[in-house]
Amino acid sequence: MQQDFWTLGAMARCRAESGEVDEAESWFLAARRVFRGVSPFPPAVLEFQCGQMWLAQGELVSARVWLESATRRLPSYVPAHGHLAEADAAEGRVAVAIERLRRLALASDDPDYATRLARLLGGCEASTEARFWRAHAAARYEELMARHPEAYADHAAEFWLTVGGDPQRALRLARWNLALRATPRAQALVNRAMCRVGQQRK
């Protein structure tokens, strides 16, 4: 097997998906070392994937190192900035996370950034702006669900479960999402929605 960038990157992703994070990082590092192309996109995506892996593990320092490297290569790499905002918030740097998410929510048509911004602003009692971004995200999810329901069922369920404030709707979407893709993550979303609905009925 030729040990090129693409092969090593695929090995890294397989290890990451299996939860072998230390070994996965070794493969990510090996892939980055052998890259000889001129486009910044392949190594930036690779670095983003490694940062995403560490963020899922709660390893914020390692996640930040990889995500910041990705954004240095591609300053306009929106998903990497989104995950950096997540790391900022987890580290207690809420004002930094809010400012980062404001820029993303204004520049991107992905309602996930508006959702996360509304959630953080709600926690900071910035109610007027939080309501604005909540309404913005709700309108965008309505549009996306009308056009691409299978692709956005899980994200829309997450929205209605959190800042959207409609656990019943979230549960309907989460169950439909589970029927579409029977994964542990989809089941966890159903379980969370059922718990919230139960709490609401008490």
Image (tube, rainbow, N blue to C red):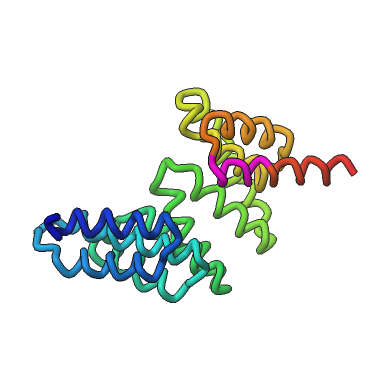
> Where does residue 72 sit, x and y in percent of width and height?
26, 67
> Where does residue 131 sit, x and y in percent of width and height?
64, 47
**At x 60% / y 43%, what residue is drawn?**
158
**Residue 197 shown left or right of residue 3 in the figure:** right
**At x 25% / y 57%, what residue is drawn?**
9
- Above or below, 180 against 7 in this view is above
**Residue 185 shown left or right of residue 131 in the figure:** left
Report the quarter where the C terminus lies. top right
Magenta stretch, main secondary structure class: helix
> Where does residue 92 sit, x and y in percent of width and height?
58, 73
**At x 54% / y 33%, what residue is drawn?**
153
Report the quarter where the N terminus lies. bottom left
**Residue 150 shown left or right of residue 123 in the figure:** left
Numbered range of the magenta stretch? 183-190
Check residue 157 for magenta coloring: no
- Looking at the picture, tell me which residue is in the foreground, 144 or 176: 176
**At x 65% / y 59%, what residue is drawn?**
126
